Amino acid sequence: PRNASRDAAGTVQLAGVPVTELAEEFGTPLFVVDENDFRSRCRDMLRAFGDNARVHYASKAFLCGEVARWVRDEGLYLDVCSGGELAVALHAGFPAARIALHGNNKSVAELEQAVTAGLGHVVVDSLIEIERLEAVAGRHGVVQDVLVRVTVGVEAHTHEYISTAHEDQKFGFSIAGGDALEALAMVFEAKNLRLVGLHSHIGSQIFDIDGFEISARRMLGLLRDAIDKFGVERTAQIHTLDLGGGLGISYLPNDDPPPLADFAANLRRVVAEEAARAGLPTPVIAVEPGRAIAGPGTVTLYEVGTTKDVSLDAGARRRYVSVDGGMSDNIRPALYQAEYDCRLVSRSSEADPVVARVVGKHCESGDIVIRDTWMPADVGPGDLIAVAATGAYCYSMSSRYNLLTRPAVVAVRDGSARPILRRETVADLLSLEVQA
Ligand code: LLP
């Protein structure tokens, strides 16, 4: 992380706070969020995308009240995809008009929550939902702004994209199949809905602009068709082209995501060119980064509990280093074979490095934090290890597997630390019990 340094004893400081103090005060495992890092990435996004753009932070990457306030104060919009995320955002004082609601199966209760709170827009994802939302809005005497989520036929994978064979998934309305025009027609018929834009999300952890370019081209092509079919007047208020999230970050030392300013400038240029090609004015670009804002500035601190040398073929050995969390606080290695980098952070070590695997404390052999790494040979019980770039989709996908309690999350800034989510306790587990 940007704000890390080592003192004379080799103890790492995060934003000026020694990890040993953090572990002592808040316990481990611990998520440590660098507040200035998070906030500066919000500002970088606004600067990179410029005035004719809207940046929505994707809550699913990580949301709590304090994070919602950072996002609000930095002037971004917020995407939520459940009643829970919406409730946390509103409770934190996030202005409803700057919130958008996503999801392929929003409940009637969630739609009611959105409409009555006065959300900026709802991204509609099925014909049934359009009908439902129309009814809810009508019941409350509201005209609700909506975007229609479309499937552009591009699926981005980590470092590549494939431009065929991904129509078969649950999100959005297919452009190629004609479903998107049908959805637009239905929204135009709905008296209590107002179509203000099109949305597509092509994937996550993307380093390359090409998928977005195709996405923009196909959405603008759809808009062109919609104008021809439904007329200039009915389509006049469609001003937003939402390209979704997906900007990739660096997890390992050699990962090389493009600089944000270049990425954004390319995206803006491509959208302007595609709009001109379709004979349309340049739309407002919306983006929905989650990982690129929340990911890089957070580390997970673990304490080492045990180590064990395991014999491999040909007489080689591997050091298993067990930490006090694992797949309950970071499911990504098990779920996506995601790779992370870690360091011994409580002290320095001159010991020779050994081949190591960092594992959690769960009852599964797939409970791996880092599959292959090097670790000083003297790392052992009581040492602290930090895993980098765990701010996105680790806490938010955490579980209570094996009835571990969720870690605390602390924010560090200018030499001080404060909790933004407390550690779960056994009392929290027991509070769900129904008394016999
Ligand atoms: N917008 C929409 C509609 C999305 O579905 C997502 C992510 C985002 C924005 C934010 O994408 P980001 O900028 O964070 O890549 N759990 C996975 C990632 C799944 C993302 C799902 N949607 C992971 O841990 O990598």
Image (spheres, helix red, strand yellow):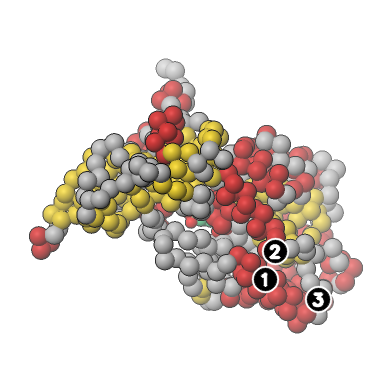
Q: Position of residue 116 (x, y in %)?
A: 77, 39
Q: Secondary structure at mark 2?
A: helix
The residue mark sitting in front, 3 or 2, is 2
Q: Which residue is mark 1?
A: 265
Circle 1: is it few (<14), some (14-19), or many (20+) Cα within 10 Å?
A: some
Contact between marks 3 and 2 (CB within 8 A): the answer is: no
Q: Residue furthest left?
A: 315
Q: Nearer the viewer, residue 21 or 295?
A: 21
Q: Is residue 209 left or right of residue 341?
A: right
Q: Is residue 329 left or right of residue 135?
A: left
Sequence-first disc among 3 and 2: 2
At 62% across and 76% down in the image, what residue appears? 214
Mark 1: which amino acid? Ala
Q: Quadrant of the C terminus?
A: top left
Q: CA distance from mark 3 to mark 2?
A: 20 Å
Mark 3: which amino acid? Leu
Sequence-first disc among 3 and 1: 1
Q: Position of residue 20 (x, y in %)?
A: 39, 36
Mark 2: which amino acid? Phe
Q: Residue furthest top?
A: 436
Q: Quadrant of ligand 1?
A: bottom right
Query: Which image quadrant is residue 111 in?
Result: top right
- Mark number displayed over residue 280: 3
At 84% across and 67% down in the image, what residue appears? 235
The residue mark sitting in front, 3 or 1, is 1
Q: Which residue is mark 2?
A: 49
At 85% across and 43% down in the image, what residue appears? 141
